[in-house]
Amino acid sequence: MEALDIGGFVLLSTASLVFLVLQSWLAATVVRRVVGVPTGWPRTIFVGLVMSAGMAVTVQYLYRAGTGDNHGGLEVAPGVAALFTALAIGWIFALGVGALVMVEAAFPTGSLPSPQSLFFGWKSRRRRARRYAQVLSIATRHGLGSQLRGFGGDSPGRAVKTARALRESLAEAGVTFVKLGQMLSTRRDILPAAFIRELETLQTQVTPEPWSVIEPAIADRLGRPIGEVFASIDPRPLAAASVAQVHEATLLDGTEVIVKVQRPKALNQVSQDLDIILRLAAWLNKTTVWGKNLGVNALARGFADSLEEELDYRIELDNMTSIEHSLRRSGRFDVTVPHGYPELSGERLLVMDKLPGQPVAQAGALLEELSSAERARLATTLLGATLQQIIGEGTFHADLHSGNIFITPEGSLGLLDFGAVGRLDPGTQTSLGLMLYSIDQNDSAGATDALIELLGRPDGLDDREVERAVGALLLRYGGGGSSAQGQKLFDDLFTLVLAHRFSVPAPISAAFRAMASVEGALLTIDPSFDVVTVARQEGNRLVRSKLKGTKITEELQRRVLQLLPMMDRMPRRINKITEDLEHGRFSMNMRVLENPSDRRFLTSLFQQLIVAVLAGAAVVGAIMLITSSEGPMLTTDIRLYSFFGFFLLFGGFVLSMRSLMLVFRRGVDG
């Protein structure tokens, strides 16, 4: 007897499990295909359990009503009880589908942690939560929290206050956030001037790691004892930055080198902070209007990618080699780049030759000994090499501040720190060169065309208005002038770009950043240096060099070869058009909905309209049937038409859910 009870229990449990699986699958299918919501399985199974419990209670109740064993409750015939059971099961299923739709609308699949994440990775989540709380505490303490909603508001005083709070918060939050602020300080195309001024002053104060920490890190990244590679290495750092520090060393053959080693804990800290920055960007993009307008998600992702590249010294080694080759190809032998040692370098360690001399930022005494002509020559060489990299080669050093430029005892220049290198395609190089060439020739039309070609055409751009604005700038600053005037020219040109809603792609922004950063070094080398005049002359020279001799011939030949197939077919096409015009057969075909996106838009619009009409008709018809006083009686209180009305209302409910989700999805897609 006990064996039979156990067997019956197992059979009932198996049947219940099969019923739950089938019901969950059916609910998921209805929600996914009929309603159009990609709901997840965990929530579907949970709702299926609730529906199963409700169905079990309902079936038990109506079964007793059909057998006459429902004292004090509903008493109906067995056939009517079966109809009621089918209707109740349908409505319980519909309500379950509705619950899934509402849960999906409030918490889309993927927006909540997965069940397995509740049991795994809790240590990393705890560390992230602690750091996240620390960052938010810093922002709140500096008064940034109350300013976020009104970021960049109309009040100048409020903008200045918010900018100062942002700078102070980033400075205190650490290296990753400082670098984020430094990156944002170059984006004058998206941030107000008050924020740019504050973020440009961001600096990080770091304490060097002790030699007891750095020595084993170098040995670990070399993969062997330090004594097998270096004859000596200075334990005192030559320079200490937030991510790495630099030590002087001597190889076994006596070559003096520089060892750049990443701090042991830098990678983990940066990775954790990048995760927080990406989460903050997603939150700001969702909760603030300015966050969505600025595209903070894309900004954060671009910053994360560039910082991850900067942390990989193999990329810096490749960049250093590329710049060295580009300088040699252009004949710039008066600009030196240190030679790297790939066999000794790696992802977190970089070994390179030591450049003789001093960085411009610390070469005040050396510069004082030079004549005005020598200082002007150095500044011209530096600007020429920078423009040669940008316009002539397309691979350029993007962070040429005074600490990354060396003056050697021989009177030449050296470049350091190739973590930030920009690259431009040939078309962009040509457009930049033509813009400088047109500025030098006071050609406002040519400068306008080059600017549009460089940045792309915004919607609704008035070419004549842009040309007049460019012409006014050229007329105002056409005579060159002091470096301060030159700087004002570039500021006004950038203001013009923003006023006409041009967007600045990242590679071009990097080129502008390189020009902005090198300007400070130029004026340190020679305070009387006329940046604009020399830039115009160098741009003119570079463009003319591209148009000399075989270069222009090769370019024309390439363009003609591209046109040959079209020119070959042109006579036949012209003859066909003239014949059609002569005999009255000329016609034109226009496809209004040729674009697939237009067809998808209209299709979705008609779908939404048809589903809404059907849902409304079903609900109205159901109400009319339910409230009807005509028709045969199904029970003493319920008419047959009313019963059918509840079935029709069930269909209207499902269609209403479908219409509702179409509205939600159109809002998200739009």
Image (cartoon, grey):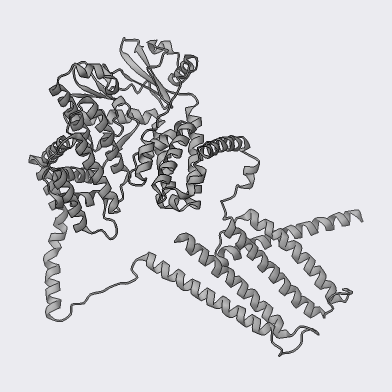
Q: In the depicted view, which residue is nearer to us: 72 or 497? A: 497
Q: In the depicted view, which residue is nearer to us: 281 or 558? A: 281
| Identity of the residue drawn at 19% across and 51% down | 448
Quarter of the figure with residue 631: bottom right
Depicted 451 relative to depicted 131: above or below: below
| Identity of the residue drawn at 44% across and 49% down | 291
For this view, does 68 lie left or right of residue 637?
Answer: right
Depicted 91 relative to depicted 142: above or below: below
Residue 317: % across, % down: 33, 27
Residue 125: % across, % down: 59, 38
Quarter of the figure with residue 601: bottom left
For this view, does 228 lie left or right of residue 472?
Answer: right
Q: In the depicted view, which residue is nearer to us: 355 or 595? A: 355
* Rendered-image quadrant of the N terminus: bottom right
> How many badges with numbers are in the image?
0
For this view, does 44 lie left or right of residue 266?
Answer: right
For this view, does 162 lie left or right of residue 320?
Answer: right
Residue 208: % across, % down: 45, 19
- Residue at the outermost front position: 157
Residue 150: % across, % down: 46, 49
Q: Is residue 318 visible?
A: yes
Q: Is residue 26 visible?
A: no
| Identity of the residue drawn at 16% across and 58% down | 565
* Rendered-image quadrant of the C terminus: bottom left
- Residue at the outermost right position: 1
Q: In the depicted view, which residue is nearer to us: 484 or 498? A: 484
